[in-house]
Image: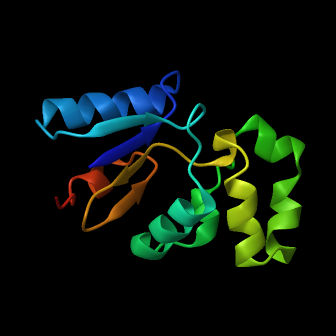
Amino acid sequence: MLFVCYPKCTTCQKAKKWLTEKGISFEERDIKTENPTKEELEAWYKKSGLPLKRFFNTSGILYKEMKLKDRLPEMTEDEQLTLLSTDGMLVKRPILISDEQVLVGFKEKEWETLKD
């Protein structure tokens, strides 16, 4: 299982603690130093079944500086994936990728449904 996070993020820290307490083994990846590629993001997006907007860190400084709230609706899916792959700080975190599913953001109720 791959746990993509930003170590300084308190939500990511809570999610990591939750995984550890549940005895779930995972490989950790820092989203800032090893940003997901466009191909990874596309695969995770398709596997997740979530709208692509859920992959954007809408509360992030960069998202706001780039005025993405107004720009995203006019962008194609391909353009959005390309943009996400340019900077890890644009990507919502944490992301947990298992063989079965992709979870974006940490909501304990959603994570309780985790399948290996």
Taking 20 as reference, is 77 left or right? Answer: right
Quarter that holds the C terminus: bottom left
Q: State whether residue 8 is above or below residue 22.
A: above
Is 99 in front, or is 58?
A: 99
The residue shown at (59%, 55%) is: 37
| Percent position of residue 9, x then y | 52, 27
Q: Position of residue 92 (x, y in %)?
A: 57, 48
Residue 42 lies in quadrant? bottom right
Counting every numbered tag in the picture gives 0
The residue under the point 88% across, 41% down is 65
Q: Answer with the quarter of the image where residue 88 lies.
A: top right
- Foreground residue among 59 and 5: 5
User: With 43 as the anchor, is 3 left or right in this view?
Assistant: left
The residue positioned 80% from the left and 67% from the top of the image is 72
Q: What colour scheme does the image use?
A: rainbow
Q: Is residue 15 left or right of residue 33?
A: left
Q: Position of residue 76 (x, y in %)?
A: 78, 78
Residue 106 sits above or below residue 14 on the image: below
| Residue, far top | 8
Residue drawn at the location 21% of the way across and 60% of the way down:
113
In this rendering, position of residue 13 left or right of residue 6: left
